[in-house]
Image (cartoon, grey):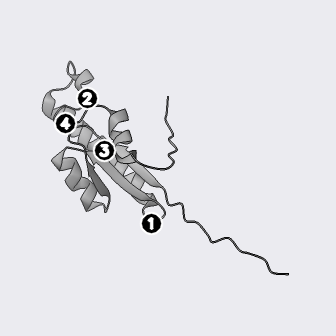
Amino acid sequence: MQRSIAPKVSMRGMLLIPFKSLATAKQRLAEALDQQQRSQLAEAMLRDVMTAAAGVLGRIDVALVTGDGRAQAMAKELGFAVIKDTHNESETAAIEMPLRGASSVATIRQS
């Protein structure tokens, strides 16, 4: 009796981190923080997220989706892929952009 063995299929995932811009970040805090403070806060928050995400490198790919040059440099320092978002429309558009043409996609959203 001969058994056929199905080949192992690798389904490596990718963690996408969308980020708009340090220059225009956290606009809702404009009454409490000036532009420089908002940019610094956004950079610190992005660095925290990317530092946490770095823990999965090697198990899944990690990519930052952004058009912001400083954020791209931070991502490259951590070994992340960079997907350039030249439209900077929305978080949803930033996530959907690299997925165009994918045969299947799973998303997890926090409400």
> In the rendered view, would you say 26 is above or below 50?
above
Local packing at callout 2 (Cα closer than 10 Å; few below 14, some 14-19, many 20+) is some
> In the rendered view, would you say 84 is above or below 90?
below
Is 29 in front, or is 66?
66
Query: Is residue 71 rendered to the left or right of residue 103?
Result: left
Residue that lies at the very extreme toward the right in this rendered image: 1
- From the image, which quarter does the N terminus lie in? bottom right
The first of marks 3 and 2 along the sequence is: 2
Local packing at callout 1 (Cα closer than 10 Å; few below 14, some 14-19, many 20+) is few
Q: Quadrant of residue 42?
A: top left
Q: Which mark is residue 58?
A: 1
Local packing at callout 3 (Cα closer than 10 Å; few below 14, some 14-19, many 20+) is some
Front of the two marks 1 and 2: 1
Query: Is residue 100 rendered to the left or right of residue 69?
Result: right
The residue depicted at 49 percent of the width and 33 percent of the height is 110
The first of marks 4 and 1 along the sequence is: 4
Amino acid at the residue labelled 2: Lys
Amino acid at the residue labelled 1: Gly
Q: Residue 106 location in percent, x, y?
A: 52, 44
State how far apart marks 2 and 4 are (Cα): 8 Å
State how far apart marks 1 and 2 are (Cα): 32 Å
Q: Secondary structure at mark 2?
A: loop
The residue depicted at 44 percent of the width and 54 percent of the height is 14
> Label 3 belongs to which residue?
46
State how far apart marks 4 and 3 are (Cα): 10 Å
> Label 2 belongs to which residue?
26
